[in-house]
Image: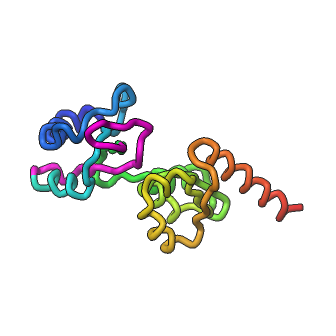
Amino acid sequence: MYEQIEDSGAPAMLLEHYAGQLEYHDPWHRGREISHLFRGRIDAAEADALLRERGHGNLRLVDNGGVHLQSDTLGELRAYHLIPAGGSKAAAVSRHMRARGLRREDTVAVGDSREDLAVADVVGTFWLVANALERDPTMREALGAHSNVRLAEAGYGAGVYEAVITTLAERRATVA
């Protein structure tokens, strides 16, 4: 898939159009099989419109949240994945659940981006780690659409640990 996206010319077009605002997320963009991984500071919806306008409507640019790098000119940088338009984390999780025979109420997921939040639609419990709201305070508004979303007090790996341990402890308490 990575090569097909490359051959379409869409990555080069985005890099040219957003010169100085978008670049490959080095070194993590190397060796990828599906998505092209960028970093920068652009509006993903605007980029999607540009992709459609330039004949690449089969692709979309997903804003995957902030990265740990700062730019002197752009400030806090964000990560972006250029993926097939029909692809999503929620669809992948749903497919994985079906393949494993998992019921929605028995599943939990953890994330830190708006794209991750869409997984709440397919799992029993979804945890959003603290850094998600620190990096994108507008996500708080989107939480109201999901009754199964919980907020971890910690961010990053510590937030994932909190979500897993809390979920396991609560489930153990209901069984005992």
Q: Residue at x 26, y 39 (%)?
A: 73
Q: Residue 22: image x %, image y %?
A: 24, 39
Q: Quadrant of the N terminus?
A: top left
Left or right position of 94 against 9: right
Left or right position of 2 against 161: left
- Extreme-left residue of the structure: 54
Q: Residue 127: image x %, image y %?
A: 59, 57
Would you say residue 56 sits in the magenta stretch?
yes
Q: Quadrant of the C terminus?
A: bottom right
**Residue 118 in the image: above or below residue 30:** below
Observer able to see residue 58:
yes
Would you say residue 136 sits in the magenta stretch?
no
Left or right position of 79 against 20: right
Q: Nearer the viewer, residue 21 or 54?
A: 21
Q: Residue at x 48, y 66 (%)?
A: 140
Observer able to see residue 91:
no
- Extreme-right residue of the structure: 176
**Residue 53 in the image: above or below residue 121:** above
Q: Nearer the viewer, residue 166 or 140?
A: 140
The answer to which image quadrant residue 174 occupies is: bottom right
**Bounds of the magenta segment:** 54-76
Q: Residue at x 37, y 37 (%)?
A: 70
Q: Residue 62: image x %, image y %?
A: 33, 50
Q: Residue at x 10, y 50 (%)?
A: 54
- Extreme-front residue of the structure: 72
Number of marks in picture: 0
Q: Residue 105: image x %, image y %?
A: 65, 64
Q: Nearer the viewer, residue 163 or 122?
A: 163
**Residue 162 in the image: above or below residue 140:** above
- Give the color scheme: rainbow, by chain, secondary structure or one colour: rainbow
Overall secondary structure of the magenta section: strand
Q: Nearer the viewer, residue 17 or 75?
A: 75
